Image: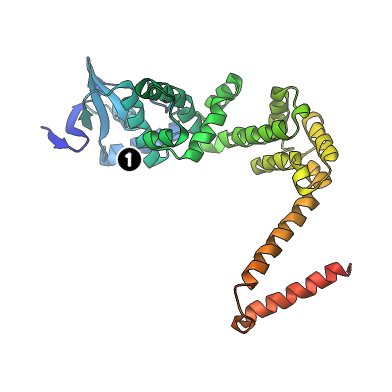
Amino acid sequence: MTFEHSTGKLADIKVDSIFTNLENPRTAFRQEELEQLQESIRQFGVQVPIAVYRSKGGYVLIDGERRWRCASKLNMKTIPALVQDEPTDLENLLLMFNIHALREQWDLLTIALKLPKIIDLMKEENGREPNEAELSVRTGLSRGIIRRCRLLINLPQKYQDMLLEEIKKPKSKQTISEDFFIEMEKSLKTVERAMPDILPDKDKARQALLKKYKEGVIANIVDLRKVGKIARAITVNADPVEAQEAIRRLLTEPNYSINDAWTETVSEAYAERDIVTGIDRLLSKLDEVEADELDDDVREKLEELVRRAQAVLEGD
């Protein structure tokens, strides 16, 4: 028995008549997640229908591969499914991307590896390559996510392969993440722009930073952002020659950390810039209020600020 649904017809279809979708960006199905879902389906059944389209010899998955895998493991004969007409190649990919955008379940690299095909198909459809905004609208991905994907797409194959192996593991056992490579690529791009002579071999730089991260010399992924700030030393009136030497040491000396380089070069300059920015904001806010409008808490804080500023100026 079937009935019309806004995105297809709902029907119970045979589990063994369903095939995986070769275009599905999701390639890693972690065992512990499958086991949890399988137990839920064992107790309560499949609560959310999968989505499929008709194809020669059966049905092809659009959404719900984990549910289908679990149903198969449990030897279920049928599974509830929304059955749609066969989409075009582009529609097939975009359907899966928009489903993902609602659920945030895919690993970012698996999304990134499918984006070039979507871009090529959209180019065939429109006669030109889509811009970032068009790509965002069609895929349901934010422009920020698309930019992060582009960084992963441009990684050498060996690092993509390394990440694909990592994402097969439970999250708690992964040692290298997509975020590490994204932050590293951003920082190295900044170094390339600000100090082009310091990176004659970008891949050696990647290997050095990756080795330091694995060995704990780089303790925090976010610290990688400091590398780009060191490369932009001149923007905060810090010594660019010292900064360049610190980055060279960072990429060649095994125990020299990002925090070492930061402290020795630009930390004070950035701290001073932040103080100036904060003071400018405070002065702007003070221009908006009258003295008799200040409550006691604000007055106390301003008096404390004056005392501390005076002490700094007098060298105490």
Residue type at the position of mark 1: Ser
Quick check: 258 left or right of 105? Answer: right
Say whether residue 73 is visible. no
Q: Residues within 10 Å of mark 1 (few under 14, many from 20)?
A: some
Where is residue 146 shown, x and y percent of the image?
Answer: 49, 34
Say whether residue 178 is visible. yes
Q: Residue at x 50, y 29 (%)?
A: 109
Q: Secondary structure at mark 1?
A: helix
Q: Give the farthest residue toward the top.
A: 57
Q: Nearer the viewer, residue 17 or 136?
A: 136
Where is residue 175 shown, x and y percent of the image?
Answer: 61, 34
Which quadrant would residue 165 be assigned to in this image? top right
Taking 287 as reference, is 54 above or below it? above
Quick check: 285 left or right of 86? Answer: right
Taking 36 as reference, is 118 above or below it? above
Q: Nearer the viewer, residue 269 or 99?
A: 269
Quarter of the image for the N terminus: give it. top left
Q: Give the farthest residue toward the right.
A: 315
Where is residue 72 shown, x and y percent of the image?
Answer: 29, 26
Where is residue 38 shown, x and y percent of the image?
Answer: 34, 35
Which quadrant would residue 184 be assigned to in this image? top right
User: Disc 1 marks which residue?
Assistant: 40
